[in-house]
Image (cartoon, grey):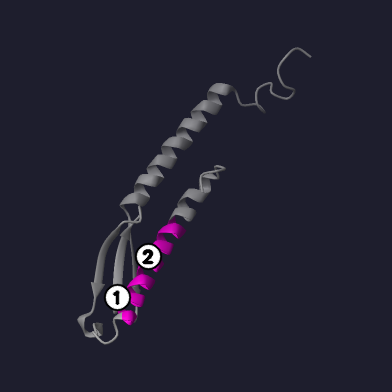
């Protein structure tokens, strides 16, 4: 055997140029998917509609809506809990969408 590694002849039938083309296509698809996720908005509502939030696919808080009838100066902690819960739920939705869309790429170290 002359130099090189055993079994590397043709990389399983795929030449290096073809492998590079596939890698570039995967990178372009990955970037497109990331861009699509970034412009999506994710909404979560808690407390029977008392608090709702919207976040972007990049996890930026975009909007908070609070029904005024739940604002009670005697129970600020409840309002705080509702806001935290709705934000965390919206963030979980972003994570789930990212896992769903990006999971198809199965690149070690990406997620």
| The stretch drawn in magenta includes residue 96 | yes
| Percent x, y of residue 94 | 40, 59
Q: CA distance from mark 2 to mark 1?
A: 12 Å
Neighbour class for label 1 at 10 Å: few (<14), some, many (≥20)? many
Q: Quadrant of the N terminus?
A: top right
Image mark for residue 51: 1
Q: Which image quadrant for residue 41?
A: bottom left
Q: Classify mark 1: helix, strand or loop.
A: strand
Taking the image as shown, residue 6 lies to the left or right of residue 84, namely right
Region in magenta: 77-97
| Percent x, y of residue 29 | 43, 40
Taking the image as shown, residue 1 lies to the left or right of residue 92, namely right
Q: Which image quadrant for residue 10?
A: top right
Where does label 2 land, which residue?
Answer: 90
| Percent x, y of residue 89 | 40, 68
Image mark for residue 34: none
Spot the residue most to the right. 1
Q: Classify mark 2: helix, strand or loop.
A: helix
Above or below: residue 80 compared with residue 28: below
Neighbour class for label 2 at 10 Å: few (<14), some, many (≥20)? many
Q: Which image quadrant for residue 57?
A: bottom left
Above or below: residue 33 compared with residue 69: above
Taking the image as shown, residue 14 lies to the left or right of residue 64, namely right
| The stretch drawn in magenta includes residue 100 | no
Identify which residue is drawn at 29% across, 85% down: 75
């Amino acid at each position: 055997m002359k130099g090189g590694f055993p079994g590397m002849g043709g990389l399983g039938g795929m030449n290096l140029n073809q492998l590079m083309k596939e890698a570039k296509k995967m990178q372009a698809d990955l970037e497109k998917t990331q861009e699509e996720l970034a412009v999506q908005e994710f909404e979560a509502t808690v407390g029977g509609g008392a608090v709702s939030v919207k976040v972007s696919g990049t996890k930026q808080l975009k909007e908070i809506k609070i029904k005024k009838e739940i604002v009670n100066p005697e129970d600020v902690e409840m309002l705080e809990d509702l806001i935290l819960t709705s934000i965390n739920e919206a963030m979980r939705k972003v994570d789930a969408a990212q896992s769903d869309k990006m999971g198809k790429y199965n690149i070690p170290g990406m997620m």
